[in-house]
Image (cartoon, helix red, strand yellow):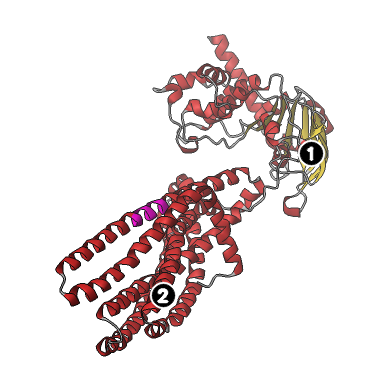
Amino acid sequence: MNLKRQDIQLLFKLFGFLRQYYRYMTGAFLSLVAATGFSLVVPRLVGQAIDAGLAGGDVQFLFTYALWIVASGILRGVFTFLQSYLGELVSARIAYDIRNALYDHIQRLSFDYHNKMNTGQLMSRATADVDAVRWFISFGVLRTIRVVLLFVSAGVLLFSLNWRLTLISFACLPVIGVWAVLTSARTRKIWADVQQYIADMGTVLHENLSGIRVVKAFHREDYEAAKFEKQAKRVYKGSVTANRIYSVNSPAMSFVLLLATGLILWLGGRDVISGRLTPGEFSQFILYLLMISQPVRMLGYIGNVTSRAVSAGERIFEVLDAEPTIKDAPDAIKLSRSKGLINFENVSFSYDSAEPVLSDVSFEAKPGQVVAIVGATGSGKTTIISLIPRFYDVTGGRITIDGIDTRDINLSSLRRNLGIVQQDVFLFSASIHDNIAYGKPGATRAEVEAAAGAARLHDFVVSLPKGYDTWVGERGITLSGGQRQRLAIARTILTNPPILILDDATSSVDTETEYLIQQALAHLLEGRTTLVIAQRLSTIKRADLILVIQDGCIVERGRHEELLKRDGFYRKIYDLQLRDQEEASFLQEGRRHREEVGG
């Protein structure tokens, strides 16, 4: 195997997962030694039976030795079973540990990592790459130990029988060794490519399944099928190429060994005829030589498994070694229930030291205030609200909550004080009850129902056949947009946070649904500091402070009426986007009033 220094270091890192299972591995190792020992006993028994039993014509002697051989075979089978079982047990536990370690670490990595890393790539590392490592632990490690143990033990026994024939036999080993190294070097690169192809295929599959509605809407099933087939073909071709090399490698090694065996048969046979070797000793020699040939032939496959494990291990540790850029300071302060005072002090921010997204942003959100953030797409609105929970860290200035820099606050306690309702609501494949209680797992059914009632969702839920036990499809696909928004609001109400961050929940719903959501929000906003990205006039007019963002800077601030009078950038936004909403709102209110009067 053509292993470089960094490859060996990586394998030792993988072996680190073995530490807690050293008892099982010790048991597997001892079982392997015992199974190998009983394997080595059999040729000796056969040789003695031939020389003493057959030559002397002692039937009782032959029967006794036959029983010993059968007993050795049974014991070898028992210990081989134990070695295989314990090896598989350890490899399965290690795969379990690595998958959990990967998942746990991925959860803790910062948003900037997830922005760069594709979901399909991460899924591949947790599945195909972990399986490659598992196979290496269960097969490669123990088989390598067996090869070394068997080769050394059988080699010593061969030398004790006839050193001249042993040297002739071992003359073929350098050829086999060089062949194995060259094969490993070729397959290492191929398996690295295959692991990447599997990850690319996973990415295509994940994107297709996530966007299946778009695929069907644009009738692109054939295109997507062809795209997936292209990736699957790359995996297929790479795997076939690697296995073709191995398939050529194994017979070539066997041929070299059989050549050596033929030569030994000719030379050793002459020694038997001349009396320098007994028939039993020669039989032992041939059996031990055949015993060595099996693990030597396995070298190619072991190299194949190891090469694949090294490639997979590199990809696994790329994730495990990645450090979250957002983490707690060594002396982080645990924030109790916040008063809700938020200050942005000359805040600047840029992604990857690129063009600044925010420049010198300063404002104060007082306890209980509603602060609306308005501006054109790409102006930096979402970035502002993403900095408060430290999804990213500021690159200049600071953000404080109750006078404490957010970078000095324990992350868990910081985010427990925040309630975030996003425009693109994510729901899990679980019941409505579990989705609402996600932020407060121990919530009672009464608490969940109260939160749903405040979010104007309870009546809808109880109208369903299974009520709160109704299963929500993947990403909440079985609910309408307005229902998903109200469920998200209920989820936030249940956690009872002192600070709210809203990505305008009413920007893409009809007026009736907006009315229900606004009622829910009115309940949610009571007594809380709220920052909201606002695209609806109804939300903006409720705000105590409006921040108008242009190119990452606050260009205007004030209340709705004040900003209109200034005839500045906000007035342009109002004329282009908000005036129609106000006129539609007047018509809607008039219609509702007439209905009430008529009723």
Q: Nearer the viewer, residue 358 or 375?
A: 358
SS class of the residue under badge 2?
helix
- Quarter assignment of residue 382: top right
Q: Nearer the viewer, residue 107 or 346?
A: 107
Q: Where residue 295 sits in the image (x, y, percent)?
A: 39, 70
The stretch of residues the image draws in magenta is: 79-88
Q: Seen in the image, is 103 located left or right of residue 559?
A: left
Q: Is residue 81 magenta?
A: yes
Amino acid marked by disc 1: Phe
Q: Seen in the image, is 53 located left or right of residue 419?
A: left
Q: Which residue is mark 2?
A: 155
Q: Is residue 327 magenta?
A: no
SS class of the residue under badge 1?
helix
Q: CA distance from mark 1 to mark 2?
A: 88 Å
Crowd band around label 2 with a 10 angstrom C-alpha radius: few (<14), some (14–19), many (20+): some
Q: Which residue is mark 1?
A: 569
Q: Main secondary structure of the magenta part?
A: helix
Amino acid marked by disc 2: Gly
Q: Where residue 447 sits in the image (x, y, percent)?
A: 55, 18
**Is residue 81 among the parts visible in the rendering?**
yes
- Determine the residue positioned at 65% across, 20% down: 522
The mark found on residue 257 in the picture is none
**Is residue 299 among the parts visible in the rendering?**
no
- Quarter assignment of residue 278: bottom left
Q: Where residue 521 sits in the image (x, y, percent)?
A: 63, 23
Q: Which-is-in-front pick, marks 1 and 2?
A: 2
Q: Nearer the viewer, residue 221 or 299?
A: 299
- Determine the residue positioned at 49% across, 75% down: 181
Q: Where residue 262 sits in the image (x, y, percent)?
A: 30, 84
Reply above or below: 105 against 543.
below
Crowd band around label 1 with a 10 angstrom C-alpha radius: few (<14), some (14–19), many (20+): some
